[in-house]
Amino acid sequence: MENSITPKSDFLLLTEILPHYKQLNYIYFTVREKLKLNYLDQLHVTDFYNQYNDIIAFDKSLLNFSLFIDKKSQLSIIKNLTTEIKKNIELYSNNKSFFDNIDIMDVCDEFLSGHRQRIKLMEEGAYRIFHELNGTKHELESESWKGNKIVGTLHEEVKQIQAKHEKYCSELDELYSLEYEDAKNASRYFKNIFGEVCQLNQSLLTCINYYFPDEYQSNTLNEVEYFKMDFVLLIYTEFNDQLFKKISIVDFYHNINLLPAQVRLEFAENEKERVVFYVYKLYNYLKKKKCKECVSWRNNICEILKIDMNFYRSKSTCVNSALEGSKSYNFKQKINQIIT
């Protein structure tokens, strides 16, 4: 079991994605209001999609989140995240034609045109200085033949203009290099990604609703957590796919805590009597913890497991009399170690 549970840092994805969704929704809202998408916003939208378009990683994060985070914190984060995802879907769906018809090539070209304008101005400046430099050089050459005293002054002017021209050329080289890098980078953002972000939203919601069904999200604060996750893990590790039919840890936790679950808990073939003893042990565990709802829990879990209460009463302690070495005896030893 230890190998299947990933480090707690894995669920940090959920706390990271929430503020990014808020930023994404702000971008959508601003773009819709201005009826214009700028290049930096296109970068944010595309980078968001590329960063979080890993459903397996998101699913893994949700699993660990459900295992290791307390229920109240779960509810707060999941509700906020679900709200932001649904808000993004709504912003896109209500303005689908507008978002889908944004010409991303034009958006990128408008950004790159800023480089071209700066380069054009710098080229014009460099051209003027080049002509000024040539004119001063011709004047210097002419005055040198005449032997005029102005030659020294012209020498200094040539040096100054030459330095100015070299500075312009150096800055032009930097602008050319920057334009090349930005054009190369922009080529990664030529795609209109809004429709795919909406599809990603739907996939993420599907994952969330698997681990945290809508009914669970709306009712969790009013529910009693009968058994903490660390305790549930001990039982699950020992008895899943043995005492019970195979089920996910999340569904097992939801069933045993009487929460809505995607899959109903069922006992395995020929395990009904041992399951009754298991329920009996958990019931007594709750009684020792002075849980006021222990009787209600017992009745409800028996209903989930489709165990008649008359059968429960007649078989709840049968395992206690199991012969040493038998399957029921070994089961009793295991469960007594976990549930004291």
Image: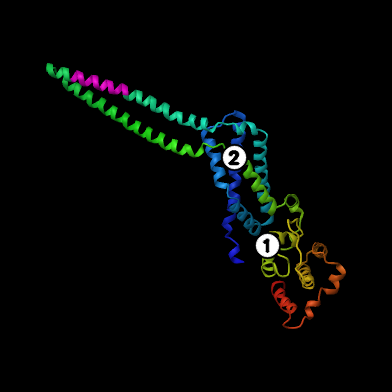
Give the SS element for disc 1. helix
Task: Check the image and report above or below for 322 versus 78.
Answer: below
Principal secondary structure, stretch drawn in magenta: helix
Mark 1 or mark 2: whose residue is earlier in sequence = 2
Picture quadrant of residue 27:
top right
For residue 128, above or below residue 252: above
- Which label lies toward us, 1 or 2? 2
**Residue 147 location, quadrant:** top left
Q: Is residue 93 visible?
A: yes
What x and y, as percent, mark residue 316? 82, 73
Which of the pair 338/150 is nearer the observer? 338
Circle 1 crowding by C-alpha within 10 Å: few under 14, some 14–19, many from 20:
many
Q: Position of residue 321 (x, y in %)?
A: 79, 81
Question: Is 292 positioned to the left or the right of 180 in the image?
Answer: right
Q: In the rendered view of the protein, which quadrant contains the C terminus?
A: bottom right
Toward the bottom, the furthest residue is 324
Residue bearing the label numbered 2: 24
Residue at (64%, 47%) from the top-left corner?
203
The amino acid type of the residue labelled 1 equals Met
Asked if 127 appears above or below 24 in the picture, the reply is above
Q: For the point 78% across and 77% down, which residue is it?
A: 319
Q: Is residue 150 visible?
A: no
Q: Which residues are magenta?
A: 127-140
Looking at the picture, tell me which residue is in the foreground, 31 or 156.
Answer: 31
The answer to whether residue 192 is above or below residue 281 is: above
Q: Quadrant of residue 92?
A: top right
Q: Residues within 10 Å of mark 2 (few under 14, many from 20)?
A: some
Q: What residue appears at the point 55 percent right and 46 percent down from the top-left corner? A: 51
- The stretch drawn in magenta includes residue 314: no
Q: Give the residue number, with chain letter if any, for mark 1.
A: 229
